[in-house]
Image: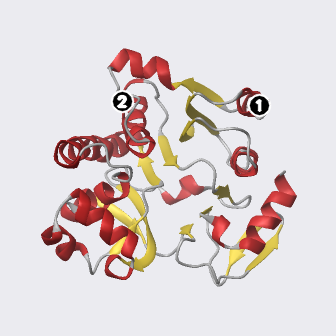
């Protein structure tokens, strides 16, 4: 069995949650799990009705001494690591964001995972040096020297970690160690997960596989893409992705998905 795993804290029911849960059911031989903290009753009721496995994040936090006051972006990685290490036996896992992810109906994202010895991450098809937000995150979390080493690299998206469970755990272990050092330097900064992912992957690139052909399409820098649809399978431009992430930047696509799934 394969598994889609996400994390949510303090959410009320929103259309993006409906798109996520309903489209995840397209994936065969797969369970969907959310590690949740303070989810509203309507979210819990909806997710249960869609067959989503809900894991109590507060119980995990109490058992493993997790400080719930740190940034949700940091908590996401910590909970993914703990869940991967202690609570799941799934063969392949996709760790992802919650409210802006759509799974194409005619494509099984776990077909991407063919090598058990690597972890798959996804590019945003934009250079770090051309994105002020990612440059700022790196400068705050590390220093200008690290940023300079990475500036000509493609941005890797913090909302996608995919692979065999053991390989995913290796990356999550590295990120948790790295984020602990970041917090020791700069405190509880809100956005450290993506900076950490980029640093951990690019500094040990032989361990990882970067998906560079929009197998998992991150739309943050591609708001002008147009889409076509056939049997709930969406193409964007020339791309036929397994997963569409950050679709909310393409407003016609967002509206179509909301109209279809909500």
Quarter of the rendering containing residue 51: top right
Whole-number angstrom distance, CA of label 2 to CA of label 1: 30 Å
Which of the image's four quarters has the N terminus? top right
For image coordinates 26% across by 77% down, the residue present is 151
Q: Nearer the viewer, mark 2 or mark 1?
A: 1
For image coordinates 27% across by 60% down, the residue present is 201
Q: Position of residue 60 (x, y in %)?
A: 43, 21
How many other residues sit within 10 Å of disc 2, few (<14), some (14-19) or many (≥20)?
some
Question: Looking at the picture, does residue 256 appear above or below residue 164?
Answer: below
Q: Earlier in the sequence, mark 2 or mark 1?
A: 1
At mark 2, the secondary structure is: helix
Q: Position of residue 19 (x, y in %)?
A: 74, 51
How many other residues sit within 10 Å of disc 1, few (<14), some (14-19) or many (≥20)?
few
Question: Looking at the picture, does residue 153 appear above or below residue 84?
Answer: below
Question: Looking at the picture, does residue 2 appear above or below residue 205?
Answer: above
The residue under label 2 is 85
At mark 1, the secondary structure is: helix
Question: Looking at the picture, does residue 212 appear above or below residue 12?
Answer: below
Q: Position of residue 122 (x, y in %)?
A: 44, 65
The residue under label 1 is 42
Q: Position of residue 215 (x, y in %)?
A: 54, 68
For image coordinates 84% across by 65% down, the residue present is 231
Give me the disc on residue 20.
Answer: none
For image coordinates 63% across by 36% down, the residue present is 31
Judge from the rendering whether residue 104 lies leftward or rightward of residue 93; answer left or right: right
Nearest the viewer among 43 and 5 is: 43
Judge from the rendering whether residue 203 lies leftward or rightward of residue 50; answer left or right: left
Quarter of the rendering containing residue 79: top left
């Amino acid at each position: 069995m394969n598994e889609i795993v996400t994390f949510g804290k303090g959410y009320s029911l929103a259309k993006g949650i409906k798109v996520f849960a309903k489209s995840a059911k397209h994936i065969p031989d797969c369970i969907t799990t959310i590690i949740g903290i303070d989810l509203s009753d309507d979210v819990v009721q909806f997710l249960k009705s869609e067959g989503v496995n809900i894991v109590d994040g507060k119980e995990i936090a109490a058992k493993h001494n997790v400080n719930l006051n740190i940034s949700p972006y940091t908590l996401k990685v910590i909970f993914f690591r703990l869940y991967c290490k202690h609570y799941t036996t799934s063969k392949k896992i996709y760790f992802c964001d919650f409210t802006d992810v759509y799974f194409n109906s005619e494509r099984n994202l776990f077909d991407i995972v063919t090598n058990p010895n690597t972890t798959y991450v996804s590019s945003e098809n934009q250079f770090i040096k051309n994105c002020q937000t990612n440059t700022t995150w790196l400068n705050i979390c590390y220093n200008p020297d690290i940023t300079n080493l990475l500036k000509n690299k493609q941005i890797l998206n913090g909302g996608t970690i995919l692979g065999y469970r053991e390989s995913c755990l290796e990356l999550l272990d590295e990120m948790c160690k790295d984020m602990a050092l970041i917090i020791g330097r700069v405190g509880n900064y809100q956005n450290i997960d993506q900076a950490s992912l980029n640093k951990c992957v690019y500094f040990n690139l032989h361990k990882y596989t970067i998906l560079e052909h929009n197998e998992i399409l991150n739309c943050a820098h591609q708001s002008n893409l147009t889409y076509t649809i056939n049997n709930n399978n969406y193409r964007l431009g020339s791309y036929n992705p397994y997963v569409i992430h950050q679709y909310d930047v393409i407003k016609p696509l967002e509206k179509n998905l909301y109209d279809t799934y909500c």
